[in-house]
Image (cartoon, rainbow, N blue to C red):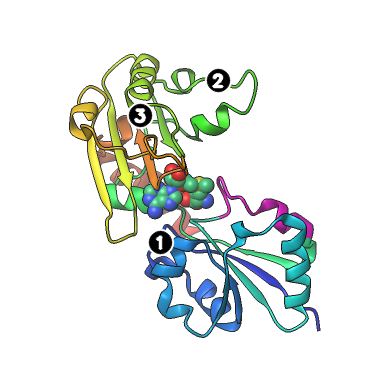
Amino acid sequence: MTHLVYFLGAGPGDPELLTLRAERLLRECRVVYVPPLYGQTFGELLTDKELFIPFEYYFADLIAMLKEQLTKGPVAFLVPGDMTFFSPFQALVDALGDQAVVVPGVGTANAASALLKKTLDRPGVCSRTVLTSPRTLGEVPGAPSMRELAAPGVTLLIYMNNLPFAELVDQLRQGYGKDVPIAVAHRVGLPEEEILLATLDSILDKVGSRDFFNLDNTDRRPALTLLLVGESLMAEADSSWWDYRRDHIWKSREKS
Ligand SMILES: C[S@@+](CC[C@H](N)C(=O)[O-])C[C@H]1O[C@@H](n2cnc3c(N)ncnc32)[C@H](O)[C@@H]1O
């Protein structure tokens, strides 16, 4: 029998954000690859498992271990957030081919939007959302800067910030050309969860000397901090849209 490797979107850290499907598959696997943080927060679901930290192994060794483990049963990987954005597991999924199954989860962006109680698009206010990272932009010659991505009508989701915060805020202020809301979503879904909501002109005072991005730390690992920027974060929804849609869109669908 061919067993499978499940890449389970594990959400930002809170096990309650695991989907029912991911939880069921996790229970079926005895061997689980777990980033260190998830080893702590998912403790109760991992008690009877054989645990491995994926980032401790070279790629070829990892594939060899997986092939051996798959002769005995299915294997699970807990994927931080969800595979959709900035996931390091793509090469493994590609190498495993049909033996890999990707299970969607709650991305950090979804969990942060829920904390803010805001949809990140807003008719008439925000027409596009850009998910980006100054870290990955820096790896592509000719890629736009954060200043070029920031513009009125854009909601920016900024992962893995590696720029000094004052420099990033300055670039965003230039790009938007006005003061717009910004949220610092730190350790979302974890016991130390914190969300700071301010504007580009006031966020530096609010953050003070705190290093939300691990920039002062020698290991320079990306911090568990997501930035959200744009008018949609504080815009009030126009309730007349509801009745307009009821009359022109939803009502006609009901009949068809
Ligand atoms: C390699 S990316 C992984 C993103 C993940 N695939 C997702 O869907 O959320 C890591 C970055 O995601 C963001 N992030 C991940 N977990 C987070 C959390 N619990 N709270 C806030 N930001 C988080 C941070 O910007 C961090 O630097």
Residue 85 visible, this orientation: yes
Q: Nearer the viewer, mark 3 or mark 2?
A: 2
- The tag earlier along the polypeptide, 1 or 3, is 1
Chain-order first, disc 3 or disc 2: 3
Query: Of tags 2 and 1, which is closer to the observer?
Result: 1
Q: Position of residue 241 (x, y in %)?
A: 31, 40
Are the residues flagged by discs 1 and 3 in contact, CB closer than 8 Å? Answer: no
Is label 1 in a helix, a strand or a loop?
A: loop
Q: Do the numbered discs 3 and 2 sit on residues whose CB atoms are within 8 Å?
A: no
Q: Is residue 85 magenta?
A: yes
In the image, residue 25 lies at what x, y percent? 58, 77
Above or below: residue 8 compared with residue 48 = above
Q: Which residues are magenta?
A: 83-95
Question: Which badge, 2 or 1, is on the more N-terminal residue?
Answer: 1
Q: Is residue 106 magenta?
A: no
Q: Residue at x 45, y 32 (%)?
A: 162
Q: Which mark is residue 189?
A: none
Q: Residues within 10 Å of mark 3 (few under 14, many from 20)?
A: few
Q: Is residue 197 left or right of residue 232?
A: left
Mark 3: which amino acid?
Answer: Gly
* Residue 18 at x, y percent in the picture: 45, 68
Tell me the mark number nearer the camera, choosing from 1 and 3: 1
Cβ–Cβ under 8 Å for marks 2 and 1: no
As measured in the structure, the alpha-carbon distance from the residue carrying label 3 to the one carrying label 2 is 25 Å
Kindly identify the residue that appears in the image at 58 percent across and 54 percent down.
83
- The residues bearing labels 2 and 1 have C-alpha atoms spaced at a distance of 31 Å
Image quadrant of residue 15? bottom left
Give the residue at mark 2.
144
* Mark sitting on residue 124: 3
Q: Is the CB atom of the residue marked by disc 1 within 8 angstroms of ligand 1's nearest atom?
A: yes
Q: Disc number at residue 13? A: 1
Residue 150 in which image quadrant: top left
